Amino acid sequence: MSKKRVYRFSEGNAQMRELLGGKGANLSEMRSMGLPVPPGFIITTEACIKYYEEGRVISPELEKEVEDALSALEEEMGRKFGDYDNPLLLSVRSGAVVSMPGMMDTVLNLGLNEDTVEGLARRVGDRRFALDCYRRFIQMYGDVVLKVEYNFDDIIEEEKEKRGVSTDVELDEDALQVIIDRFKEVIEKETGEPFPKDPKEQLLKAIRAVFDSWYTPRAQVYRNANNIAHDLGTAVNVQTMVFGNMGDNSGTGVVFTRSPSTGENKLYGEYLINAQGEDVVAGIRTPEDIEKLKEVKPHIYDELTENCRKLESHYKDMQDVEFTIEEGKLYLLQTRNGKRAAAASVKIAVDMAREGIINREEAIMRVKPEELEQLMHRQIDESAKIDPVATGLPASPGAACGKAVFDADTAEQMANEGHEVVLVRTETTPEDIHGMIASEGILTSRGGMTSHAAVVARGMGKPCVTGCEAIKVNTEQEKFEVDGKTVSKGDKITLDGATGNVILGEVPMRDPEISGDFQDILQWADSVREMNVRTNADTPEDSRQAVELGAEGIGLCRTEHMFFAGDRLPVVQDMILAENAEDRKAALDKLLPYQKEDFKGIFKEMAGYPVTIRLLDPPLHEFLPDREELLQELIELRQKGESQELKEKEELWAKVKALNELNPMLGHRGCRLGVVYPEIYEMQVRAIMEAGAELVKEGMEANKIIPEIMIPLVGHERELEILREMTQKVVDQVKEEKGVDIPQLIGTMIELPRACVTADTIAKHADFFSFGTNDLTQTTFGFSRDDAEGKFLQQYMDQNILEQNPFIEVDQDGVGDLVRVAAEKSRDAKPEIKLGVCGEHGGDPSSINFFYKQGLDYVSCSPFRVPVARLSAAQAKLKSGGTSYEQKGES
């Protein structure tokens, strides 16, 4: 750790983000670029970490460094902190290493008391302005630092109503003085102490409050949701105040160098005249579009535009810039890589590559795989007839439908119960983060395109409509009114984040398409990646969709899904209930045509691509009636007396009871079924090969049919040796009978630890291995996935026993090491063996990166995750090449 804990802006730069936090590093960088940044200093993230290590105490050494930095700032500004005649006022803001908008605390106008407020009034010649700053400071300090749980806005609203005014800026000096006095009374009553007058005490307590905000529940929820480490700490930025609330020649705003919703290359943002920065993001007043600034203050707009272009060129990414205008002079208060919607992320990356700002490889690395996943969400069908009841600001694109809820706790509770919900608020606050995460979309009646709701929703990829003033929200009664209609809690509403429309009820949706910039970024990724991407598909329809999304084959076709179809299940049950092999074979003969038609349809859709078909895997009892329901039926029939139906149910019950397993996960399933009932696998292999032969007879080229027959759950080489011999025998029989030679591979699914550590012996009998990482995770950990996720897995992550859910992101130290061992051993034994992954991890970006490092040939995932896997595979290749893509500007 560095001994120095406080840095002036002139001492830092953008490369020091780990130490100075994103905001402080960027303020330092902007100052070095000659941009108009109010001076200040930064207390480092290391100081925050040490603050917690020392029991939440600001050490004398840190206090001395702060005093020295403050003295230097006073000298630079020609003002004194706490001076009665010419006071220096400060803002105190958090600055995490990774951007966490709105999650931590800020204090503005720090340094005011009864004396300095008069000094400020004399200096600027405007006592009303000084009092406005003082009431803002008391309100913010009371909330953030003193933790007073009181809605100060109620007092403001009472005074406005009493004086017959509608906005804060209409409150005169007398009204503001009354509000200040009432604020102080509330604070003294709530805390037992008067509001602090000493500016030094104010500053130290504000610094502590920012440090403390690192571990607030909302900040922890946000970090969990965005996979941000909890041990980074936050920096504290202490900066000279500039004032946007000095009258009609002042203002404040937020601007993006490109649209965060669409990616369009034009300034996008909002501002408020005669306001301070928190007014914009808090949604207290609905701001003006930045284009209006071009009309009313063209010279400020031009200067802002020029500075934004400089920042975008410097950071080589779209920037989110906060600014203040103080009596006609522009100041920049922050820049960071802007949070953006998924579609905007793709467009910005592609456009910047075309503009020559970045290269194509950097564009590939700029797009997060999860953003592509967001683009795979549904949109409102253009052909649908809709009748919006209101239209707000299109703050975050996409469509959402769900039950209206009016507070974050209810949203989380109902979502946990399986309901889709839309969170409706007057405006959101950081305390709503858990409800926002749980919701399908967010609707607010106040706030603009840069409000808290808008920024957080875009970062999450959730549809959001803000500033929808036509709806009158009543959170206490859990309803909103619009156009003479009342929408209550639980009523369904639909949001269109692309248009801002709010629609009552449910609206038809459409699946997304890959085109334009989306298609370009994927084609660029395809030109880079080495790892193939297949899909998990069991039907011709899924296969067709996957090919449209770029799949290069099927990595897992689960034949048991075909068995569950309504017209086949009775035949399957006949097969299971058969008393002898002859009866079982008769039932299987009836299933053969069904299976054959399934495979023909899939082979047609996958012409020229490999199709890995897993032979029957689950235990047989899964195809029989539910045990508890069957027992209940049996009891009812026994009560009625003897009957033919009772006799049949008793026979069925006896079979179900005989097949019941204490631990089905480790029971009679997979290749064990094939060993005991080889006729089942023989029928399936015959169906596969006859399907191919018939297609050839119908005119399809034999080399376009590429079956890979996969035998599941092998743990011992003899299992595969026996079943491979059986499979090859059926293949040869069909070849001789049909006179058609279709090349095929025979391999196994590696999903048991023993199979991994004995992979060299198993590989002797396999043309390919496909890692079934779902079951491999279960058998390695000894976890039942359903029980673990429902009962204790979240607690394991909360207590840092596990960093991630191992069923979502592969456990690299345990499960991953087994994959590595199996890959090495199998390739030592058979260098040409094909290796792939067909578990859910095949669509997880972090897991794909790991599999690429192990030299696997392909991953397979669900159809809608294929684009994610294509991009992730390309990024894995680029990362392995040691190419550096530093994301400057993120704060």
Image (cartoon, rainbow, N blue to C red):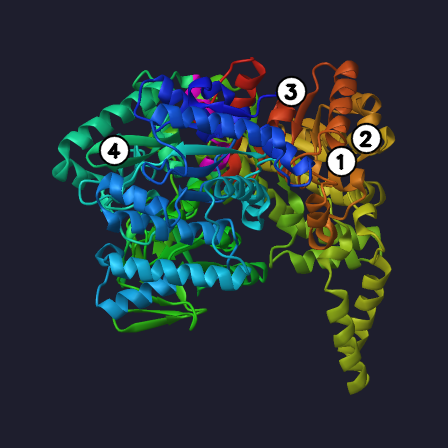
The magenta-colored residue range is: 361-372
The disc, 4 or 2, on the residue closer to the chain's N-terminal end is 4
Q: Amino acid at mark 2?
A: Ala
Q: What secondary structure is marked by label 4?
A: loop
The disc, 1 or 3, on the residue closer to the chain's N-terminal end is 1
Q: Amino acid at mark 3?
A: Lys
Residue 755 is tagged as 2
Q: What secondary structure is marked by label 1?
A: loop
Front disc: 1 or 3: 3
- Where does residue 75 sit, x and y in percent of width and height? 38, 24
The disc, 3 or 4, on the residue closer to the chain's N-terminal end is 4
Residue annotated with mark 1: 751
Q: What secondary structure is marked by label 3?
A: helix
Q: Is residue 704 visible?
A: no
Q: What main secondary structure does the magenta stretch of the protein show?
A: helix
Determine whether, in the image, residue 164 is placed left or right of residue 682.
left
Front disc: 3 or 4: 4
